[in-house]
Image (cartoon, rainbow, N blue to C red):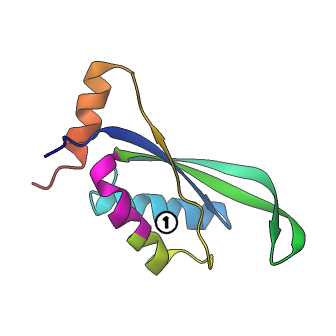
Amino acid sequence: MTQPKPVMLFISAGSRDEAERLGEGMVEARLAACGSVIPTIHSFYRWEGKMKREHEALILLKTSSDKVAAIQAYLEEHHSYELPELLQVDVTGGSPAYLEWLLEGVRTP
């Protein structure tokens, strides 16, 4: 069995309040060790054939690779968007003590 690896997830939300609610909910559920919210981002994208320009918030979620599927399911249930953004970046280095804390933070007690 492969050991879980630390990952960083990028999740956009329609508002700061929604981002904070989602991030806190995922940390409370032990799906993530930490969530950080960047309260205002400016997004440009094409949706249903039209260019969109929106003000959003961004959640930086620190978690482990074995939690990503559960996080996707959580977002499908709790996110306001029809198609929530969920992008994964593998963490290839960092403070060993922090990475240990991160992985411990998502283990089921």
Q: Residue drawn at (39%, 22%), measured in percent from left and top?
A: 93
- Front one among 99 and 83: 83
What is the total number of numbered labels drawn onto the structure image?
1
Q: Which residues are magenta?
A: 64-72
Q: Up-down: is 21 above or below 96?
A: below
Q: Nearer the viewer, residue 68 or 34?
A: 68
69, 75: nearer the viewer: 69
Q: Is residue 91 magenta?
A: no
Q: Secondary structure at mark 1?
A: helix
In the rendered image, residue 50, in percent from the top left (x then y), is placed at: 89, 73
Residue drawn at point x = 67 percent, y = 65 percent = 15
Q: Position of residue 103 (x, y in %)?
A: 24, 39
Q: Amino acid at mark 1?
A: Arg
Residue drawn at x 61%, y 73% as measured from the top left: 83
Residue named by callout 1: 21
Left or right side of 74 for 96: left
The image quarter in which residue 25 lies? bottom left
**Depicted 97 relative to depicted 64: above or below:** above
Residue 36 shown left or right of residue 102 in the figure: right
Label the magenta part by its dominant secondary structure. helix
Q: Is residue 10 left or right of residue 109?
A: right
Q: Position of residue 109 (x, y in %)?
A: 9, 54
Vertical arrangement, residue 26 with respect to residue 65, above or below: below
Residue 26 position in % (x across, y down): 37, 61
Residue sitting at the far right? 51
Measuring 17% from the left and 50% from the top, which residue is drawn there? 107
Q: Tell me where residue 96 sits by quadrant.
A: top left
Q: Is residue 71 magenta?
A: yes
- Crowd tier of the residue under label 1, counting other residues whose Cα lies within 10 Å: few below 14, some 14–19, many 20 or above: few
Horizontal relation, residue 39 to residue 88: left or right: right
